[in-house]
Image (cartoon, rainbow, N blue to C red):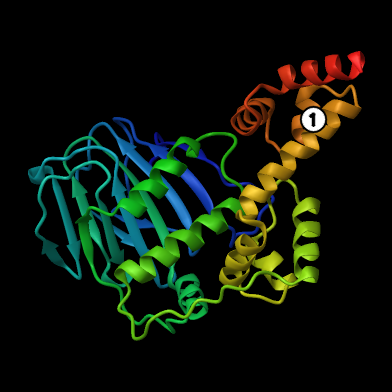
Amino acid sequence: MGKNTSPKADKTPQTSPEAPFTTFFQLDGGSTVPSQFRVPGTFTITRLQSPFGLPDRITKLSPVPALLVSISLKSLPSSRYQVWTSDKLIPTSIVHPFRSNVIDFDSRPMCWAGSAFDYVHYSVPRRGLDDIAEDLGFGRVSDYRLAVLEDDLVVAQITKSILPFLGRSDAPSVLALDQLSLILGAHLIQQYGVLQKTARHSKGGLAPWQKRRACELLHENMHGRIRLSDVARECGLSASHFARSFKTSFGISTHQWLIQHRIEHAKQLMAQTSMSLIDIAIQSGFNDQAAFTRTFHQLVGVSPGRWRRHYTTRRFRA
């Protein structure tokens, strides 16, 4: 990116280079996008926004075999938008909001937008897709069909759910992004993969020892910086198999379990200590008090301060 680009990177410095992360680039009048736009070799979510468009077309490259999933957030006239794959111009029409492209990076995709645009791009490594496909019983997926301006409701809903967190200080944890990559990956395989056989689903949950070990690890890593694959490995399972088995056992995903666990831990601290809310927020795995208050209100229905006052009053009367 050019020196005037205004990135809001959500990458957590404590995580390994292989960990997924999100980034928000807001271009201004002096910003430039390199003619070759290289993505990392891991699952990433990048929001790229410009009020001016691109002067020239750009080529998107990945250091590993991967799929590029791009989704528009605003309209573009057909005359101001072009896409190439394998050096061939793909016919396009008007770009409507939340229309998706799914393109293999091996085709060296190129694009050009001649007016203001706002896009979210997912880089999805094929290695992770292969693991998901194998676990679902499809075997290795040799190819994925090209999709341009597809009306994909699943990708649209995934994007709408992640959009409010892009560029914020309380960005999704690596555990949440691992979970999201599995959901998106399973959809890409079933919707766009050239499949050789139908899936065979395992409906079993985790064994008691696996449930105990998973809960121990999640409790020890309340900030969510642990990778889903690390928890799965401790349970002797692939990440995809573990994620499905965990949800079967607990009824919710690992990330949702962790959020609920954080809130219960915060309630304990509010009820049993005189710690400030900011200290409780940090102790419970939240980045700041604002994120804690927002999540607490969503799950409990009242603010942490109000819940604490109500609990204290009730205990005093008892």
Q: Mark 1 highlights which residue?
A: 280
**Figure check: 123 above or below 168:** below
In which quadrant will I find the N terminus?
top left
Q: Quadrant of residue 317?
A: top right
Circle 1: element type:
helix
Expressed as whole percent of the image width and height from the top left, the position of residue 105 reads 33, 67
Q: Which is nearer the eye, 52 or 194?
A: 194
Instruction: Please state if 23 lies on the left or on the right of 86 as rendered.
Output: right
Expressed as whole percent of the image width and height from the top left, the position of residue 54 reads 22, 42
**Figure check: 72 above or below 206:** above
- Residue at image coords 58%, 62%: 18
- Residue at image coords 33%, 80%: 195
Expressed as whole percent of the image width and height from the top left, the position of residue 243 reads 60, 64
Instruction: Please state if 255 lies on the left or on the right of 270 as rendered.
Output: left
In which quadrant will I find the C terminus?
top right
Q: Amino acid at mark 1?
A: Ile
**Figure check: 215 above or below 171:** below
